[in-house]
């Protein structure tokens, strides 16, 4: 049954947005499904066509598509203040929960019982990442050319340590050219639909971009003026600001790049701790990219001067969250009026199609990275000219992590278990096996 389309008052929008923010577990797929049920099916605030149209638009933007969809819906219903309310309430509940968990982790990470619980959680996360690869591959690799892009992406990252932004930009450029000359290779139709004859809202877009950029940069200017360019808060802000621009394809796509930089380049945390952070993000509502807050908290917590560790950690978490999510509002407010025109931009669709295919290889690389650091306590680097990768030391194999990962994969992928239920069982299993191992 189709619900007649209605428009809520602002108070009702705030109430429902807060409800969605508190219940948005399960990653982007679950969050998008929840918003569809609440806003399209049950209340009729947005039509089915509008919802799908907006979702396609949000996939074109860097950042978490589910949060951007929430911002767009709020903007559509009540303008800028509606977008701010819906977008903030989508993030704030999860941000508060993961901040509390990050504080606990900072003080308890080396306790035996805590490590035992996270052994199980990390093992289940490996299964969740593998599930993400399979789901995205099923949607994104519809032609041999797209499959080849995924393979090239994986090889470039795993064997040649290619920079993640270069892979994304390269895939987008090639996709643009192929859509122009051989669109059938990407599964696109050769004929170009006429661009929607809607006004070009340049003034609105420019003002939105300017105000958003000033808000995005304001805390960074304060950090630079008060602490200088060598302080950890400045490095945190710069790193996650760059990350906010290249997070196409969802959180899993960017996690490999973030892990590589945060662990190997910045030395803010270890590979197992990075896996712990993803486990925390999986158990909280809101966008999975909220794991960035965990990284920012630990980075500042461990280099606190001139603050206390707790004070520095809080500042690091807040700064990370600000520079990660403020751009989402900038993109949506600046580009939402163009949505009807972008829907028919075939070349842009071609670029996005190949970026999405490359993202499959990116997430596959993340799966291998997690598996190596989870299942083996020791790995050794191998270098063969331009090729470099890590090989596991088989004597360091962790049978407990492998067992929990296999069972978690069977439950999540095979039996379609709820992710939260699987994580709880995995945590309990990690604690039990640690007692007997």
Image: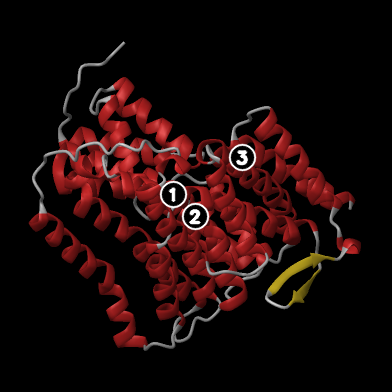
Q: Nearer the viewer, mark 3 or mark 1?
A: 3
Q: Quadrant of residue 331?
A: bottom left
Contact between marks 1 and 2 (CB within 8 A): the answer is: yes
Q: Residues within 10 Å of mark 3 (few under 14, many from 20)?
A: some
- Horizontal arrangement in the rendering, residue 165 relative to residue 38 (left or right): right
Query: Is residue 379 left or right of 323 when viewed as pictured?
Result: right
Secondary structure of the residue carrying tag 3 is: helix
Residue at 65% x, 44% y is 130
Looking at the rendered image, the quarter that the N terminus falls into is: top left
Given the current orientation, which residue lies at the most extreme top position?
Answer: 1
Q: Secondary structure at mark 2?
A: helix
Residue where numbered disc 3 is placed:
134
Of residues 149 and 105, which is closer to you in this image? Answer: 149
Using a 10 Å C-alpha cutoff, classify the residue at mark 2 as few (fewer than 14 neighbours), some (14 to 19) or many (20 or more). Answer: many
Q: Which residue is mark 1?
A: 94
- Which residue is at a point 77% across and 41% down the rendered structure image? 406
Residue marked by disc 2: 98
Q: Earlier in the sequence, mark 3 or mark 1?
A: 1
The alpha-carbon separation of the residues under discs 1 and 2 comes to 6 Å
Q: Residue 43, relative to residue 86: is it above or below?
A: above
Q: Nearer the viewer, residue 338 or 293?
A: 338
On residue 163, which mark appears? Answer: none
């Amino acid at each position: 049954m189709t619900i007649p389309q209605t428009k809520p008052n602002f108070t009702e929008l705030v109430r429902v947005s807060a409800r969605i923010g508190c219940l948005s577990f399960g990653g982007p797929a679950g969050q998008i499904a929840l918003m569809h049920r609440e806003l399209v099916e049950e209340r009729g605030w947005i039509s089915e066509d509008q919802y799908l149209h907006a979702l396609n638009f949000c996939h074109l933007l860097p950042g978490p598509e589910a949060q951007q969809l929430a911002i767009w819906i709020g903007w559509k219903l009540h303008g800028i203040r509606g977008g701010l309310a819906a977008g903030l309430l989508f993030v704030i509940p999860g941000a508060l929960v993961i901040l509390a968990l990050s504080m606990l982790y900072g003080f308890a990470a080396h306790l035996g019982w805590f490590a035992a619980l996270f052994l199980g959680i990390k093992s289940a996360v490996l299964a969740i990442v593998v599930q993400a690869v399979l789901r995205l591959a099923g949607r994104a690799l519809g032609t041999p050319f797209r499959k080849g892009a995924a393979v090239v992406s994986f090889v470039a990252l795993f064997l040649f340590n290619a920079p993640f932004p270069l892979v994304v930009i390269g895939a987008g450029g090639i996709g643009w050219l192929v859509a122009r000359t051989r669109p059938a290779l990407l599964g696109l139709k050769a004929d170009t639909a006429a661009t929607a004859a809607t006004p070009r809202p340049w003034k609105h877009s420019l003002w939105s971009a300017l105000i958003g950029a000033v808000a995005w940069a304001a805390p960074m200017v304060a950090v630079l003026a008060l602490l200088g360019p060598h302080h950890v808060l400045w490095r945190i802000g710069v790193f996650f600001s760059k990350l906010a621009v290249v997070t196409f394809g969802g959180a899993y796509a960017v996690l490999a790049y973030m892990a590589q930089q945060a662990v190997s380049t910045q030395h803010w945390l270890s590979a197992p701790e990075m896996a712990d952070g993803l486990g925390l993000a999986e158990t909280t509502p809101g966008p999975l990219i909220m794991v960035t807050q965990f990284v920012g908290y630990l980075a500042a917590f461990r280099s606190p001067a001139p603050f206390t560790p707790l004070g520095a950690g809080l500042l690091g978490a807040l700064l990370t969250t600000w520079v990660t999510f403020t751009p989402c509002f900038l993109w949506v407010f600046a580009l939402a009026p163009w949505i009807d025109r972008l829907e028919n931009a075939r070349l842009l669709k071609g670029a996005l199609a190949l970026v999405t295919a490359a993202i499959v290889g990116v997430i596959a690389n993340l799966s291998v990275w997690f598996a190596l650091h989870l299942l083996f306590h020791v790995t050794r680097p191998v270098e063969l000219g331009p090729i470099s990768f890590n090989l596991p030391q088989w004597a360091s194999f962790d049978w407990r992590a492998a067992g929990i990962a296999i069972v978690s994969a069977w439950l999540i992928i095979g039996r379609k278990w709820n992710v939260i239920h699987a994580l709880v069982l995995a945590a309990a299993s990690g604690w039990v096996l640690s007692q007997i191992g």
